[in-house]
Amino acid sequence: MRSYASKRGHFSTVPARANFNQFSALRAGTSTSTSNYSWIGSSARHCGSRVCTPRSAELRNPPIGKFLECDGVVLQYVDRSDPAAPCVVLLHGNGSLIQDFTMSGLVDLLARKNRVVCFDRSGFGYSQRPRLRIWTAAAQAALLVNAFNQLGIHDPVVPGHSWGAFVATALGVRKDYPIRGLVLASGYYFPIGRVGDVRSSHTGPGRLGQLHCRACWPEPAQN
C-alpha cells in the first residue's frame, strides 16, 4: 500500500490534494456561523500574521490516520483494534471529520470488542474530493466499498450521522456489498424541499459549481 504522508505531516506530494477542511480547523474555539466570520478581520488586527490559513490549519492539525487511494481519490482513515474482530465503520456528517468520533470517546468504547474504522469523507479533513465528479451519496458509497475491500472490511455495522446517514443508507441498498446493519442518526431519509438545498449544492462539478461556491459561501466553507 502506498504511503501519502510526507515528513511535514501531510501528503503535499499528492497532486491536487484537498486542503484541510477549515470548518474542522476552526471548531476548537471559533464559531463558524455565517454571522460570525467578522472574527477573521479582528484576528488579523490583533494577531498580525497569525491569521488562520489552510497551510497554518494543516500545521496545527496534522493527520491522525493513514491514507489509501481508491479510484484516484486519497482518503484518510483510522483503523483501531483487532482486524479479526467484528467491524464497525463510522461515517461523519457535513462540516465534520474523524476527530468527532475519536475525541468523543466513541472509538475507544467500540474498540473494546470491535474493529473500528473511521473515514474522513471526501472533501473533509484530509480526504480528497475531485471537483469533476458529482459526489452523491451513491458515489460516496461506491468509493467506500472500494476502500473496504482494500482494507479487508467484511459485513460491517455502519453508523452514519447527518449526511453520513445518507451515505450509510446508500451502502445498505447496494447488492454487491453485504453489511450487518445500519445505525442512522439525525439523517436525511425522505426527500424534502428546502431553501437551503440550492445553496448547499456548492460542491457541484465544473466551473459553475466553483463559481457558485466562491460567490455564495464565505471563505472557510469553500474548500
Image: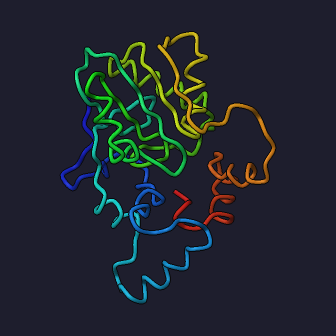
Report the side of 105 relative to 123 (left or right). Answer: left
Q: Residue furthest left?
A: 7
Q: Is residue 218 above or below residue 160?
A: below
Total tally of numbered discs in the picture: 0
Instruction: Tell me which residue sits at (50%, 13%) in the image.
Output: 177
Instruction: Tell me which residue sits at (48%, 59%) in the image.
Output: 23
Of residue 31 and residue 56, the one placed in the foreground of this image is 31
Q: Is residue 186 above or below residue 196?
A: above
- Structure colour scheme: rainbow
Of residue 211 and residue 148, the one placed in the foreground of this image is 148
Of residue 110 and residue 1, the one placed in the foreground of this image is 110
Instruction: Tell me which residue sits at (44%, 36%) in the image.
Output: 73
Q: Position of residue 11 (x, y in %)?
A: 30, 48
Q: Position of residue 75 (x, y in %)?
A: 39, 37
Q: Quadrant of the N terminus?
A: top left
In the rendered image, which quarter is residue 211 located in?
Answer: bottom right
Q: Position of residue 81 (x, y in %)?
A: 23, 26
Report the side of 82 relative to 194 (left or right). Answer: left
Q: Position of residue 15 (x, y in %)?
A: 39, 47
Q: Is residue 108 above or below residue 213?
A: above
Q: Residue furthest bottom?
A: 45
Instruction: Tell me which residue sits at (31%, 57%) in the image.
Output: 61
